[in-house]
Image: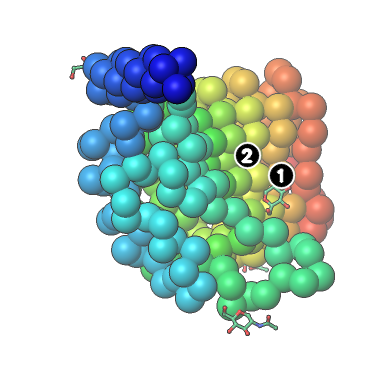
Amino acid sequence: MRKFSTIGIFLVVLLFNETTLSCLSNASTIGCIEEERLALPKFKDSFTDNTGQLSTWHNQDCCSWKGLQCDEIIGHVVRLDLGVNLNTPQFNFSARLGANEVHSCLLQLKYLNHLDLAGNYFNRIPFPKFFGSMAQLRYLNLSYAAFSELVPHHLGNLSSLLVLDLNFNFEVTIDDFTWVYRLSSLQYVALSFMNLSQTQNLHKVLNMIPCVLELHLSDCGLDNIR
Ligand SMILES: *[C@@H]1O[C@H](CO)[C@@H](O)[C@H](O)[C@H]1NC(C)=O
Ligand SMILES: *[C@@H]1O[C@H](CO)[C@@H](O)[C@H](O)[C@H]1NC(C)=O
Ligand SMILES: *[C@@H]1O[C@H](CO)[C@@H](O)[C@H](O)[C@H]1NC(C)=O
Ligand SMILES: *[C@@H]1O[C@H](CO)[C@@H](O)[C@H](O)[C@H]1NC(C)=O
Ligand SMILES: *[C@@H]1O[C@H](CO)[C@@H](O)[C@H](O)[C@H]1NC(C)=O
C-alpha cells in the first residue's frame, strides 16, 4: 500500500513538472501561437463547408485543427493541408470546400512552408497575388482550384519553393514566363491543362532553370512555343 502511494506522489510530481515546463515554453503543447489562432478564422469564414471539414477550427489549440500542423519546437503553423484529390473514383464533388476568396490573413502564418488547397473550388476568382509574399513556402499545390486570369509575377519571389503544382486551372494563363527563373530552388513544376498559348519566354526560361527535375506541361495549348 505504502509503495503505491509513493509511486502516486512521484507521478504527481512528474506531471506537475511537465505542466510547469509547458507553461514556460510557449510552444504547441499549450495550444498554438495566439496571433495565428486569431488570424485563421477569417480564412475559415470565407469557405462554404458543406461537410463540416472545418468544424474543428474553433478550439484553443489551433495545432489540432484539421489540416494544420505546427512545428513541435517553435509552435508556429508550418503546414496547411486542405487539398482533396479529385482523381479518385469515389470522389464526391459536393465534399470539397468552396470559397470566393482566399483570405490574405494566411500571411500571418510566417513560418508556413507547405500550402495545399488543391481540388477546392475558388469559383474562378483571379489568382491571388499574395501567395507571392509567403516567403517561406517550399510546397504550393493549387491544382484543380478553379482560379482564373494571370498567374501573378509575384510568385517569382518564392525563392525557397521546391514544388509548384498549378495543374488543371483551365482558365489561368501565364503572360510571360520570366518570373519563373527567379524560383531558384524549384524542382517540380506542373502546369498541365492551363492556358499557356500566349506565354512569352517559356522555352527560353525552361532551358535556364537550374534544378527542375520534373516538368508537367500537357495540353497547355503549346502549339508554337516561343
Ligand atoms: C456527397 O456529399 C454530400 C455532402 O456531404 C452528401 O450529401 C451526398 O450524399 C454525398 N454523395 C455521395 C454519392 O456520397
Ligand atoms: C515565446 O515568447 C517570448 C516572449 O513573448 C518570445 O520572445 C519568444 O520568441 C517566444 N518563443 C517562441 C518559440 O515563439
Ligand atoms: C497536388 O494535389 C493533387 C490533389 O490532391 C495531387 O493529386 C497531386 O499529386 C499534388 N501534387 C504534388 C506535386 O504533390
Ligand atoms: C515580389 O514580386 C513583385 C513582382 O515581380 C515585385 O514587384 C515585388 O516588389 C516583390 N516583392 C517582394 C517583397 O519582394
Ligand atoms: C488562352 O488565353 C488567351 C489569352 O492569353 C485567350 O485569348 C484564349 O482565348 C485562351 N484560350 C482558351 C482555350 O481559354
Q: Vertical placement of 202 versus 121: above or below?
A: above
Q: What residue sits right under mark 2 in the picture?
A: 164
Question: Callout 1 environment at 10 Å: few (<14), some (14 to 19), or many (20+)?
Answer: some
Residue at coordinates 41% horizontally, 39% vertically from top-left? 63
- x, y percentage for residue 26? 28, 22
- x, y percentage for residue 51? 51, 73
Amino acid at pointer 2: Leu
Task: Check mark 1 vs ligand 3: CB closer than 8 Å? yes or no.
Answer: yes
Question: Callout 2 environment at 10 Å: few (<14), some (14 to 19), or many (20+)?
Answer: many
Q: Vertical placement of 26 versus 113: above or below?
A: above
Secondary element at image label 2: strand
Q: Quadrant of residue 177?
A: top right
Residue at coordinates 59% horizontally, 78% vertically from top-left? 94
Horizontal side of 143 relative to 100 (left or right) equals: right
User: Closer to the N terminus: mark 1 or mark 2?
Assistant: 2
- x, y percentage for residue 41? 29, 55
Residues at circles 1 and 2 in contact by the CB criterion of under 8 Å:
yes
Q: Which mark is residue 190?
A: 1
